[in-house]
């Protein structure tokens, strides 16, 4: 499975910089989740996974992908830049839920071919032992 990366693995925005997911400051948004704090909701986990793709953080992606559906390995493409995220709809996935879905649209730019595109997915999440995990999604 190949996804893009905007930065080298381990690179992080400054604490007061905008979060790549577009919500708020990195330190108040995806930063703590990428640092190991469990996401409170399926949407928070989805936003942190988008940010992980944007930053090239395969460690976070593997840690938050349910082991029954995770690919054998991730190939993050450094030529793909993730340009923006829009959450379109959520269902379930709250602090008291066991399952949830998040539909989103993510824009990307492939530097090697100068092509722009969009990924639209309805992602499924499950909470196991107090932690949310990405299960799979339907790409549209």
Image: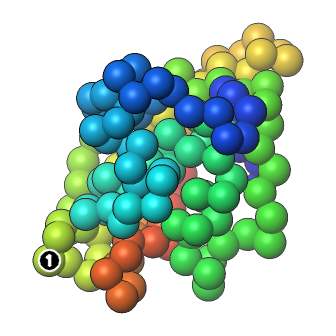
Q: In the image, is residue 89 above or below residue 7?
A: below
Depth order, front residue of 129/14:
14
Quadrant containing the N terminus is bottom right
Q: Is residue 61 left or right of residue 130?
A: right
Q: Looking at the image, which residue is at 64% across and 33% down?
A: 11
Q: Residue furthest bottom?
A: 129
Label 1: how many Cα within 10 Å (few below 14, some 14–19, many 20+): few
For residue 118, say whether it is visible: no
Q: Residue furthest right?
A: 112
Q: Residue furthest front?
A: 15
Q: Residue 57 location in percent, x, y?
A: 65, 47
Q: Residue furthest top?
A: 114
Q: Residue 129 location in percent, x, y?
A: 36, 88
For residue 106, say whether it is visible: yes
Q: Residue 114 location in percent, x, y?
A: 76, 11
Residue position for label 1: 96
Q: Secondary structure at mark 1?
A: loop
């Amino acid at each position: 499975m190949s996804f893009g990366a905007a930065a080298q693995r381990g690179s992080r925005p400054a604490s007061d910089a905008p979060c790549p997911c577009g919500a708020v400051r990195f330190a108040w948004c995806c930063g703590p989740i990428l640092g190991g704090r469990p996401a409170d909701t399926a949407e928070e986990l989805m936003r942190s996974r988008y940010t992980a793709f944007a930053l090239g953080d395969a460690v976070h992606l593997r840690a938050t992908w349910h082991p029954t559906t995770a690919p054998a390995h991730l190939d993050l493409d450094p030529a793909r830049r993730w340009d923006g995220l829009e959450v379109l709809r959520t269902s379930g996935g709250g602090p008291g839920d066991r399952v949830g879905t998040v539909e989103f649209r993510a824009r990307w730019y492939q530097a090697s071919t100068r092509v722009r595109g969009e990924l639209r997915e309805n992602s499924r999440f499950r909470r196991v032992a107090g932690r949310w995990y990405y299960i799979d999604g339907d790409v549209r």
